[in-house]
Image: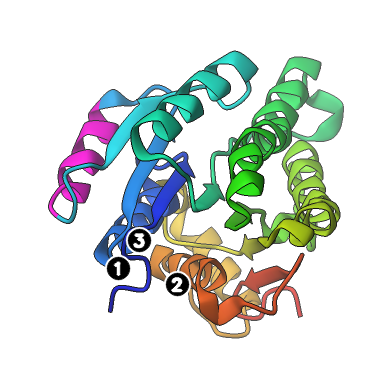
Amino acid sequence: MNRFAHKIVLVTGGSKGIGKKICLDFAKEGAIVFFFYKSDSLAANETIEELQKYHNASQAYQCSTTNEQDVQNNIRNIIKNMGKIDILVNNAGITRDSLFFLAKLQDWSDVIETNLSGVFLMTKEVSRYMIKQKSGRIINIASTSAIKANVGQTSYAASKAGIIAYTRAVALELIPYNIFVNSVSPGFITTELIKTIPEKMMENIKSAIPLKKIGSPSEVSNSVLFLASEQAGYIVGHNLVIDGGLTL
């Protein structure tokens, strides 16, 4: 199936984890994929090698999504070479978990800047071109932490809740130009971070999930690709929760 043949896709935080899976799944379905990464060039090169098995035009750009000039320059470069960006996935994010009264202001600022301001800057720049082409899909990666509170995640929860609200507001502004903006909120998903959680704690987490299992990056990616497709042509400003029932 080539739902995304001839589509140009840009994913932030695409070198590993959920972002990498999203990149690969788009490529498998015919898209030319570009992704931004912050610093891990080794992981980025490995992801590019895998992507180029599907299309050798795919490229990685080292880019800080919190740096407006960096964002503008890299996006303009893609537009210059490809002429358009059809789909944007705002996936880049960080955590600085800490009890709130022990948290440093810099840690709070880093999380808000990366997780929320980065989404704003990326969406603002890419939507300029989507408005001209009168089409586009933007999917923002939020989190169930925005819905179900976790101790030690005040900054992360605030940033992800902001993404959900931002998605709804910007969706209203962009839908007149045939640009569909939605978000997804993953729960516990198997990533490198999950693998560091002690076994006993993982058992407690699984027991709290009605489906009694941790989700996979594929389950998040499948939802992102659905929202990016023509099959989601009547979904606007929605937040799709992918959590095995955790937030019920």
Quarter of the image containing the N terminus? bottom left
Magenta residues span 42-53
Q: Amino acid at mark 1?
A: Glu
Dot 3 corresponds to which residue?
Answer: 26
Say whether residue 195 is visible. no
Q: Which of the pair 160/193 is nearer the observer?
A: 160
Residue labelled with disc 1: 29
User: What amino acid is labelled 2 in the image?
Assistant: Asn
Marks 3 and 1: in contact by CB < 8 Å?
yes
- State the CA–CA distance, disc 2 to disc 1: 11 Å
Where is residue 79, by image quadrant?
top left
102 sits to left or right of 20: right
Where disc 2 sits, the SS reads: helix
Quick one: label 2 or label 1, which is nearer the N terminus?
A: 1
The residues bearing labels 2 and 3 have C-alpha atoms spaced at a distance of: 10 Å
165 and 42: which one is in front? 165
- Sequence-wise, the earlier of marks 2 and 3 is 3
Image height of 108 relative to 183, above or below: above
- Numbered disc 1: secondary structure: loop
Q: Position of residue 229 (x, y in %)?
A: 50, 72
Q: Residues within 10 Å of mark 2 (few under 14, many from 20)?
A: some
